[in-house]
Amino acid sequence: MARLPYLDKADLPPEHADLLARGINLHRVLAHNPGAARAFSGLGQYIRHRTALDPRLRELAILQVGWLARSAYEWSHHIKIGHDFGVSDADIEALVADTRGEATALDGTTRLVLLAAREIHDGPGVSEATFAALRGALGPAEIVDLVTTASFYCAVVRLLASLEVDVEESYMPYLQRHPLPA
């Protein structure tokens, strides 16, 4: 159960009802502070719709953060979203294997993006060697967007954990297909 009640559109003044256009539990909790919800949504919308980073790579970076943080909410939501942007179940299984240091069929750029996301999650940031390799695989705008994406989702998983946001029932099949370790 979330630490704050989930709000519905009827709980908000009309000028803030748009915050719940997508009535997921994360938005329903963030709506307690419309200014914070709008700021949060602004960067999230940029990452989702305007980033220079390839959408599949973006989703894999987000999934990497969700996996490392053991965030059931983030993991389940971005498995679904990832499927919409070309992430296959085989990619998800390979992400898990790559995280364990096992060989996978993932291409070099994908493995590099996952490594960068792991380094950002683990802190303090992307290592010099990984950054040099990224320069050979991605352009400067893509690198900035990768770092921004992984960093933002590190914050998202901390927010989800701190507010104890529940996974919606409609996302549970994604967790059942790709469970997080206990």
Image (cartoon, grey):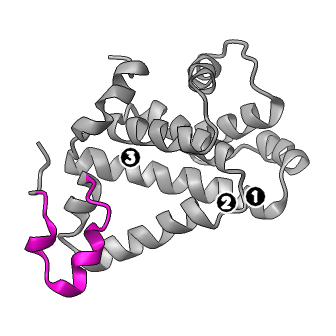
Q: Residues within 10 Å of mark 1 (few under 14, many from 20)?
A: some
Query: Outermost residue, right direction?
Result: 136
User: How far from the left and from the top, in percent, is residue 145?
Assistant: 67, 60
User: How far from the left and from the top, in percent, is residue 57?
Assistant: 68, 43
Residue type (three-letter) at the residue carrying disc 3: Val
* The disc label shown at residue 157, or none: 3
Mark 2–mark 3 distance (CA, rounded to whole Å): 18 Å
Q: Are marks 1 and 2 in contact (CB under 8 Å)?
A: yes
Residue type (three-letter) at the residue carrying disc 2: Asp
Mark 1–mark 2 distance (CA, rounded to whole Å): 5 Å
Going 67% across and 53% down the picture, which residue do you hit?
146
Q: Examine the rendering and report whether any part of residue 122 can be seen.
A: no
Marks 2 and 3, the one that precedes in the sequence = 2
In this image, 14 relative to 42: left or right?
left
In the image, 120 versus 6, the foreground residue is 6
User: How far from the left and from the top, in percent, is residue 46?
Assistant: 56, 68
**Residue hosting label 2:** 145
- SS assignment at label 2: helix
* Res. 175 image quadrant: top left
- SS assignment at label 1: helix
Query: Outermost residue, top direction?
Result: 102
**Residue hosting label 1:** 142
Q: Examine the rendering and report whether any part of residue 156 can be seen.
A: yes
Residue 138 in magenta stretch: no
What span is in magenta?
6-24
User: How far from the left and from the top, in percent, is residue 160?
Assistant: 30, 48
Q: Residues within 10 Å of mark 2 (few under 14, many from 20)?
A: many
- SS assignment at label 3: helix
Q: Quadrant of the C terminus?
A: top left
Marks 1 and 3, the one that precedes in the sequence = 1
Q: Are marks 2 and 3 in contact (CB under 8 Å)?
A: no
Residue type (three-letter) at the residue carrying disc 1: Glu
